Image (spheres, rainbow, N blue to C red):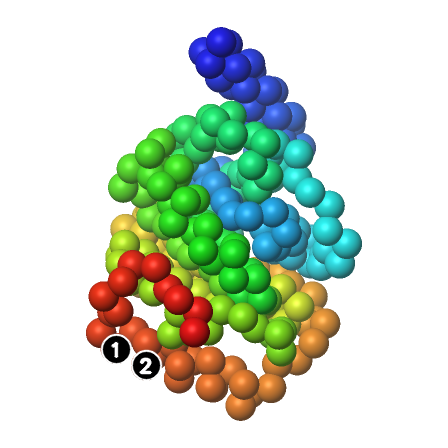
Amino acid sequence: MVKKKFLYLQILINKNTQQNVQHSNQNQQYVAEFKIVLVGDGGVGKTTFVKRHQTGEFEKKYIATQGVNISSLILSTNHGPIKLNLWDTAGQEKLGGLREGYYIGAHAAIMMFDVTSRITYKNIPKWHKDLTRICDNIPIVIIGNKVDSKDRKVKARQITFHRRRSLQYYDVSAKSNYQYEKPFLWIIKKLIGDLNLVLVESIALPPPEIVMDQAHIDQMQKELQEVENAQLPDEDDDDFK
């Protein structure tokens, strides 16, 4: 029964991938092409993150992803154009093991949580376990989204999972464009194997909906730096005190 489900899933994946490729420029030559999966609880902003990079659209109304959305992002670098096939996976529990089929063949992953929702961060270890069971030893970035919000619940000192697993972490904000390009840039540097890789054309993003106060940004960066330099707590689970 499980094999049939995964076979059916693979057929759907192949069909979606073919449809996606048909909409791309067939004459475009890429120096590299990678599959990137985005995982995390529903509503944390994965779909908005992808749309913001592609179209500049900010999704104000949350519409749950059904299964997986596959889209492409072309980055112009000093190595040449690099194509990222982005697999935006649904965060709903009802998908169960079927979701893991989407992880097969991934070159890197982005795990996202919402800094205004503690449970979405507490679930990051679960997402990491599910992901690494299928994709062992791939570059993984953790993103804390919505850092522009004044209702932040997950503080910098509580974000320690990435340090325990030697992963990369970034604060981001869809509304303000804050650090929006950094996760993808970090990923392609890792995959290409060149830490000096740069974008020769900036990712096209529209003007931010809000402007984050520079003092707020400086404070966030200071807190993150202090956390990075501090000794890790003994307990693996953060207490959110």
The residue nearer to you, when weighing 106 against 61, is: 61
Q: In which quarter of the image is residue 170?
A: bottom left
Q: Position of residue 103 (x, y in %)?
A: 44, 33
For mark 1, give the secondary structure. helix
Q: In this view, does 47 lie to the left or right of 127?
A: right
Q: In this view, does 83 lie to the left or right of 134?
A: right
The residue at which mark 1 appears reads as: 229
Q: Where is residue 16 in the image (x, y as percent from the top left)?
A: 61, 25
The residue nearer to you, when weighing 185 against 47, is: 47
Q: Is residue 122 above or below residue 37?
A: below
The image's mark for residue 226 is 2
Q: Position of residue 56 (x, y in %)?
A: 69, 58
Q: How crowded is mark 2: few (under 14 residues within 10 Å), some or many (20 or more)?
A: few
Q: Do the residues labelled 2 and 1 touch (CB within 8 Å)?
A: yes
For mark 2, give the secondary structure. helix
Q: Is residue 83 above or below residue 60?
A: above
Whether residue 180 is visible here, answered yes or no, is no
Q: Position of residue 18 (x, y in %)?
A: 59, 23
Residue drawn where x is 45% and y is 37% of the image: 35
The residue nearer to you, when weighing 208 against 228, is: 228
For badge 1, the amino acid type reads Asn
Residue drawn where x is 49% and y is 17% of the image: 6
For badge 2, the amino acid type reads Glu
Q: Residues within 10 Å of mark 1 (few under 14, many from 20)?
A: few
Q: Is residue 56 left or right of residue 28?
A: right
Q: Is residue 5 above or below residue 130?
A: above
